[in-house]
Each structure stands twice: as structure tokens, then as C-alpha cells.
Image (cartoon, rainbow, N blue to C red):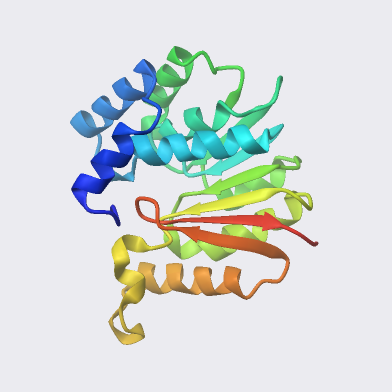
């Protein structure tokens, strides 16, 4: 998934603020015990998300795709006082692990966990979100974008993960699998949407950062 070669990735990590002890433990446990551990944001991307959140200083964050909670903990570090991060995952089997690490990070009052289909949960949140992080099933990226866009005020931000999809977005259209076609279509949708300013960062597997500039 990493776009940079292994040595450059290691160099970047060595010149990036270290993970907290909680994040390092979560990283180790995810790789030791959880299926598909590469879904974890990890050190470099986690610190990028943390830094972006600290720059934005959101009062409300929505994360679509919790996995083991690593990115949620990173993003929550940038919340304003009394801010809340809502995170949604369809797999409730990982919830006890997430709850344990959220508590260990001292963020049980900042991070609110939701289990179920994000497409049904989001409309019931009745919130405005200064920052939305999309990192769930790729075929629904465009649907999630459309669903949350009215909930983000002008000046708010959206971030989507895995938008380079291990480089598969460079394949010929006829060779793309279902997920790759969905990611490529999402990237084009964002690029063509004049309601946002966007930049695609080639960090790890690609982060699309968008600022809402009009309704």
C-alpha cells in the first residue's frame, strides 16, 4: 500500500513525531491478532491525520470506518475542548478492542462509537461536522461523500483514504477491478466538483484532502 519505497518510508517515520505508547501498543496488537492489519493507518499516516486535525481544530469529527480505532485516536487529538468524534464501523466484533484502547488513550468522553451501516446511521446523527474522514468500503465512497456533504459547513474539510489503491488507479479501465473502478470514479467526481478545493497527497496509499468552499 505504501507509495514510497521502504527506505524512504522508514526515513520519513524516523523524522516524524513518535507514536504514543497507546498507539504503538494498538499497532502491535492489530498486526499480531487482527485480520487485514494493513488497514490500520499506522505511524506516518496517523501523525498526518493528527496534524491536520490539530490545524483544523474541529468541534465535531465524523469517521466512516473505525477498524481498530487507530485513526480515531489520532484525529481526536485535534478536537477543540468538549469536541466529539463519531466513528462508525459495520463490524462490531472489534468494538471491545476499540473501546479498550480509546479508554487507554483517555478519550472515552471524546470518541463515540457506532456499530452498523454508516448509510443508515449518519442521517440520524443530526450534527454538523468540521472534518469527515472516509475510510470504509471503497464502492460506497461516492455515496458517503454525497451523504455527508450537506452536513459539512462551508470551510469544513473531508479526507478520503486509499485513493491511490496500491497504484491500481493507473491501470487501464478494462483491467480495473470493482474497487479500483470505484476509487477512480470517486477521484474524478471530487476533481470535477467545483464546491471543493482538493489535493491528493501520495502519503501511504493516498489521502484526498478536500475543503468545502461552497454549498
Residue 200 coordinates in the image, percent (x, y):
49, 61
- Image-quadrant location for residue 95: top left
Q: Residue at x 44, y 67 (%)?
A: 183
Q: Is residue 59 above or below residue 1?
A: above
- Image-quadrant location for residue 144: bottom right
Q: Residue at x 22, y 53 (%)?
A: 5
121 on left or right of 105: right
Quadrant location of the C terminus in the rendered image: bottom right
Residue 17 coordinates in the image, percent (x, y):
40, 27
Q: Is residue 198 above or below residue 155?
A: below
- Image-quadrant location for residue 171: bottom left
Q: Nearer the viewer, residue 192 or 10?
A: 10
Q: Is residue 174 above or below residue 131?
A: below
Q: Residue at x 65, y 46 (%)?
A: 122
Q: Nearer the viewer, residue 139 or 44?
A: 44
Residue 2 coordinates in the image, percent (x, y):
28, 52
122 on left or right of 170: right
Q: Residue at x 56, y 40 (%)?
A: 52
206 on left or right of 152: left
Is residue 74 among the parts visible in the rendering?
yes
Quadrant location of the N terminus in the rendered image: bottom left
Amino acid at each position: 500500500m505504501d507509495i514510497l519505497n521502504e527506505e524512504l518510508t522508514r526515513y520519513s517515520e524516523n523524522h516524524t513525531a513518535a507514536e504514543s505508547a497507546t498507539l504503538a501498543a494498538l499497532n502491535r496488537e492489530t498486526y499480531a491478532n487482527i485480520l487485514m492489519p494493513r488497514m490500520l493507518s499506522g505511524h506516518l499516516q496517523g501523525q498526518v491525520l493528527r496534524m491536520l486535525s490539530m490545524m483544523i481544530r474541529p468541534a465535531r469529527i465524523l469517521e466512516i470506518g473505525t477498524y481498530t480505532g487507530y485513526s480515531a485516536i489520532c484525529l481526536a487529538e485535534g478536537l477543540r475542548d468538549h469536541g466529539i468524534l463519531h466513528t462508525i464501523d459495520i463490524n462490531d466484533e472489534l468494538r471491545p478492542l476499540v473501546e479498550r484502547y480509546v479508554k487507554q488513550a483517555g478519550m472515552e468522553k471524546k470518541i463515540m462509537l457506532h456499530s452498523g451501516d454508516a448509510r443508515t446511521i449518519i442521517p440520524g446523527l443530526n450534527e454538523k461536522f468540521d472534518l469527515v474522514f472516509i475510510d470504509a468500503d471503497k464502492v460506497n465512497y461516492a455515496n458517503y461523500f454525497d451523504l455527508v456533504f450537506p452536513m459539512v459547513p462551508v470551510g469544513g474539510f473531508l479526507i478520503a483514504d486509499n485513493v491511490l489503491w496500491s497504484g491500481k488507479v493507473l491501470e487501464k479501465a478494462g483491467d480495473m477491478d470493482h474497487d479500483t473502478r470505484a476509487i477512480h470514479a470517486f477521484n474524478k467526481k471530487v476533481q470535477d466538483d467545483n464546491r471543493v478545493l482538493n489535493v491528493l497527497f501520495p502519503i501511504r496509499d493516498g489521502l484526498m484532502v478536500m475543503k468545502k468552499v461552497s454549498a
